[in-house]
């Protein structure tokens, strides 16, 4: 069964950058659309950015121009480059991918991003 593993979170000062990565392990056929979500304490989990297998992207208004989503289908990986980070970007970031073989969405375990001085 495919499993998603995020990495790259941490503590960064406002205005700084972080790069999150998501690796799909155990996937023989790759994943369909993939996306990043985030959830701040006491808030719902919201979509940050999404990318289709063909490379079409969309972003939440709050991150447009600051975040860039990308993927490498050959390596079954997805990245989120986050620039000009703000304190309000602080959250647990989750990756999600569509598993063709089981026709379900698969979620990673999440990685903490904290933007603070």
Image (spheres, grey):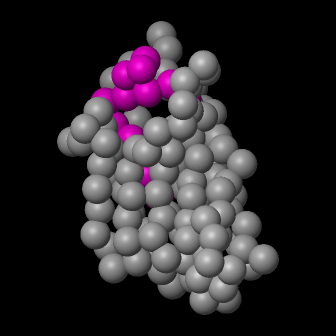
| Outermost residue toward the bottom in this view | 29
Q: Residue 113 location in percent, x, y?
A: 56, 31
**87 relative to 104 in the view: left or right:** left
So how many labels did they put on this image?
Answer: 0
Most extreme residue toward the front is 103
Observer able to see residue 66: no
Q: Give x and y (percent) for residue 13.
A: 45, 20
**Horizontal and vertical percent position of residue 65:** 21, 42
- Position of residue 20 relative to residue 51, above or below, is above
Determine if residue 98 is in view.
yes
Residue drawn where x is 45% and y is 70% of the image: 33
Residue at 40% over, 35% down = 17
Residue farthest to the right?
1
Q: Does residue 100 belong to the magenta stretch? A: no
Q: Is residue 85 magenta?
A: yes
Question: Which residues make up the magenta segment?
Answer: 79-91
Vertical side of 42 occupied by 113: above or below: below
* Left or right: 101 as drawn, with respect to 51: right
Pick the quarter of the image with the N terminus. Answer: bottom right
- Name the residue at 47% across, 39% down: 46
Residue at the far top: name it.
117
Identify whether 37 is placed above or below 29.
above
The quadrant in which residue 87 appears is top left
Q: Position of residue 32 (x, y in %)?
A: 49, 76
Residue drawn 32% across and 73% down? 55
């Amino acid at each position: 069964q495919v499993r998603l593993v995020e990495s790259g979170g941490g503590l960064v000062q406002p205005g700084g950058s972080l790069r999150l990565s998501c690796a799909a392990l155990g996937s023989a056929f790759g994943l369909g659309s993939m996306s990043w979500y985030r959830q701040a304490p006491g808030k719902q989990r919201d979509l940050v950015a999404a990318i289709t297998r063909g490379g079409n992207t969309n972003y939440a208004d709050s991150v447009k121009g600051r975040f860039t989503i990308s993927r490498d289908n050959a390596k079954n990986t997805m990245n989120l480059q986050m620039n000009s980070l703000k304190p309000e970007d602080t959250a647990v970031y989750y990756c999600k991918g569509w598993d063709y073989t089981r026709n379900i969405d698969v979620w990673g375990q999440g990685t903490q991003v904290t933007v603070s001085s």
